[in-house]
Image (cartoon, rainbow, N blue to C red):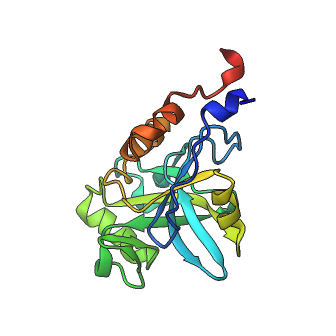
Amino acid sequence: MATDSDIFKIKHNNLHPGKGSILIAEPFLQDAYFQRAVVLLIEHNLNGTMGFVLNKKTDLVINDFFPDLEKLSEIPIYLGGPIGSNRLFFIHTLGDLIPDSVKISDGLYFDGDFDTLKQYMIRERSIAGKMKFFLGYSGWTQGQLGSEIEEDAWIVSHSINTHIMSANDETFWRRSMEVMGKKYKTWINFPKDPYLN
């Protein structure tokens, strides 16, 4: 006999994760970091996987931590994941303008020389859509992410949404699910806390 959760159960889509892939959390995941999360993978190899949750904005802003950035418009910090939560990470679209950047995919980069990045921010002033900052990251040991995907905890997408720099809440999770097609409509409509219905 089918249980209530079986009605919403959808088999994973057989896409394999890779550098630049997006992970979309299934709606039953109640973990504080990953509930309704969309994760950008910046590394995936035999040693494990690293990524950033794109849509969990904190109340913190970069400007409060760097005096030379105080006069800029507020730049939010996102909760990248539970590992290394005392370290700041960033992704950007600036490529070779930031030395030591690591290419994630076409037009999207990770890390690089932070002093150069700050100088760019001060000089250009308008950085909307060009960079995003994270406290901590999400990580999986060898084989761990594969097991979670097999258990249908995540859907893998290879289409990087052009709005990842402005993603800040659950609406980005919904939009990312909509891109996956009609069969995921039940996931989109599943209540965040079904026990309150």
> Looking at the image, which is closer to me, 2 or 64?
2
Q: From the viewer's perspective, is 64 left or right of 103?
A: right
Provide residue 100's location: percent of width, then percent of height.
42, 85
Note whether 126 is above or below 27 in the view shown: below
Residue farthest to the front?
Answer: 1
Residue at 37% from the left image edge and 66% from the top image edge: 92
| Label total for image | 0
> Looking at the image, which is closer to me, 154 or 141?
154
Provide residue 112's location: percent of width, then percent of height.
44, 78
For the N terminus, the quadrant is top right
Residue at 37% from the left image edge and 76% from the top image edge: 116
Note whether 165 is above or below 194 in the view shown: below
Provide residue 109's location: percent of width, then percent of height.
39, 72
Residue at 68% from the left image edge and 32% from the top image edge: 5
Note whether 150 is above or below 163 in the view shown: below
Residue farthest to the top?
Answer: 197
Provide residue 97's location: percent of width, then percent of height.
29, 78
For the C terminus, the quadrant is top right
**Which quadrant holds residue 171?**
top left
Q: From the viewer's perspective, is 65 left or right of 196?
A: left
**Which quadrant holds residue 50?**
bottom right
Residue at 52% from the left image edge and 68% from the top image edge: 16
